[in-house]
Image: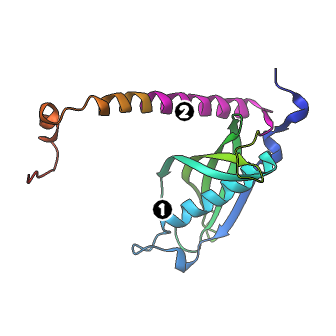
Amino acid sequence: MTNISKSKPVSHSRTTITELMIPSYANFGGKIHGGILLSLMDKVAYACASKHAGTYVVTVSVDGVNFLQPIEVGELVSLHASVNHVGRSSLVVGIRVVSENVKTGETKHTNTSYFTMVAKDDSGKPTEVPALVLESKEDIRRCLEALKRKQLKEAYKDSFDNEISALHLEEDLHLLKQERIIIQS
C-alpha cells in the first residue's frame, strides 16, 4: 500500500480562479475567445498541480475541451480545479468552468477539461509526486473516471497506430468517396 506520510488529500490542492471577462478577450463574434479560456484553464491546472506536487509542473496533454456554452463580456468566469488522479510523476487535473452573469445571478457550466501535468525537479527531470488521498465518493468517482479515460486513450492510440500502419492507399481510397474532398492528383 502507498505510504500515507508521502500523500496529500484532494482538498489540499483544490483551486479556484475567478476572472472578469473584459472586451479585449472577445472574438470577432463578440463572445469570449476559446484561446483565452484555454490559457486560464492551463493557469488553474498549473496552480492546482504544482500545489499538490510541491514543485514545478508542465502541461503534457489536454483532453476533452468542449465549449458547451458561450461566455459573454462582463461575466465572471470561475475555473474550479482538482487533482483527480496521480501517477508516479504525472497528475490529472479536472477543470470545471462556470460563468456568472452578475446582473441576473444566472450561472452556466461552460467547459470541462482534463489536463495531464508532469512534475519536474530542479534539473528538469520528471520527479515523483505525493500519493493522492481520496476524501469523498466524489473524489473516488473522479479518480475512477480519470483512470478509465487513461485506459481508453491508450487503447485508442494502440488501435489507431495499428490502423494507420495497415493503411493501403489504393485499397482504402474508397473511404474518401463519401467525404467532401476533391483529389487533384
Look at the image and say whether residue 133 sits in the magenta stretch. yes
Q: Amino acid at mark 1?
A: Pro
Neighbor class of circle 2 (other Cα within 10 Å; few <14, some 14-19, many 20+) is some
Q: In which image quadrant can residue 77 be found?
A: bottom right
Q: Range of the magenta residues?
A: 129-156
Q: Position of residue 65 (x, y in %)?
A: 50, 50
From the image, give the main secondary structure of the stretch colored magenta.
helix
Residue 124 image position (x, y, % from top left): 70, 52
Judge left or right: residue 177 versus residue 48: left
The residue wearing badge 2 is 149
Q: Quadrant of residue 17?
A: bottom right
Residue extending farthest bottom: 24
What residue is at 62 percent from the left and 71 percent from the top? Answer: 103
Extreme residue toward the right, this view: 5
**Was residue 53 drawn as part of the magenta stretch in this picture?**
no
Q: Which residue is mark 1?
A: 70
Above or below, 172 against 92 in this view is: above
Work out whether residue 99 or residue 89 is closer to the camera in this orientation and state it: 89
Task: Note whether 57 is above or below 104 in the view shown.
Answer: above
Residue 92: x and y in percent read: 65, 41
Question: By what rule are the colours in the image chosen?
Answer: rainbow
Image quadrant assignment for residue 170:
top left
> Which residue type does callout 2 highlight?
Arg
Tell me if residue 1 comes above or below residue 177 in the rendering: above
Foreground label between 2 and 1 = 2
Tell me the distance, in whole angstroms, between the alpha carbons under discs 2 and 1.
Answer: 26 Å
Residue at image point 84% right, 35% down: 7
